Image: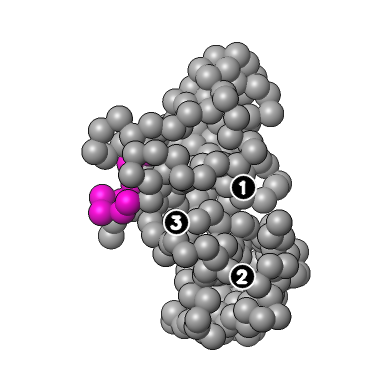
Amino acid sequence: EPEVTQTPSHQVTQMGQEVILRCVPISNHLYFYWYRQILGQKVEFLVSFYNNEISEKSEIFDDQFSVERPDGSNFTLKIRSTKLEDSAMYFCASGGDEAFFGQGTRLTVV
Amino acid sequence: KQEVTQIPAALSVPEGENLVLNCSFTDSAIYNLQWFRQDPGKGLTSLLLIQSSQREQTSGRLNASLDKSSGRSTLYIAASQPGDSATYLCAVKKAGGTSYGKLTFGQGTILTVHP
């Protein structure tokens, strides 16, 4: 069964460093998303991406965040200068009416 | 701003019980509603999708209903099993003519089914 794949599963980084989280969406999907879940909190929307451009972003998605679809299969989230409060589980999703989520990348900023 | 609330926050039941998880949302102008399962430290698995025009959806032992006008959905789990233990999340997609809108999540119901 097709699935959304995320790498790495866990990343530890020092504050101020840049990180890139990678996702391979389901191949015939056209809409892509990033969400995050801080430990103990709700899953919250970051950004949606369609037709090679951002279609919607939340107030969380500020200038330190960017997304890219560098080729026909990958979808990435870059955090330019990580802060302690960026520590969270980051989920990639793809789909249309129904959203399918990956297993997540646990980002720990130390 | 859409707010999604799930009740109860946690539920512990013996194996075999039928149970109901509740989800309410403040803005009834939704495109659809999705129920997910999340195991500890894992991703979200889609369980059921209900379009705004639908009243319910069924998959195996799971049945989800939607009352859009009152801003409520319920997830019914029949004959619960220890393997059903997980966090169940409700999420709504706002209306607006597109299928690619963002999901707004509730905080989840932590379900424990003990043998």
CA–CA distance in space, label 2 to label 3: 15 Å
Q: Amino acid at mark 3?
A: Tyr
State the residue at coordinates (75%, 69%). B8
- Callout 3: residue from which chain? B
Tell whether B34 sits left or right of B11.
left
Q: Residues within 10 Å of mark 1 (few under 14, many from 20)?
A: many
Q: Which residues lie in the magenta part?
A: A23-30
Which quarter of the picture shows residue B37? Answer: bottom right
Q: Is residue B1 magenta?
A: no
Tell whether B20 sits left or right of B81.
right
Residue A99, how many percent across, how many down? 44, 58
Residue designated by label 2: B29
Residue designated by label 3: B100
Residue designated by label 1: A44
CA–CA distance in space, label 2 to label 1: 19 Å
Q: Residues within 10 Å of mark 2 (few under 14, many from 20)?
A: some
The C terminus of chain B, quarter of image: bottom right
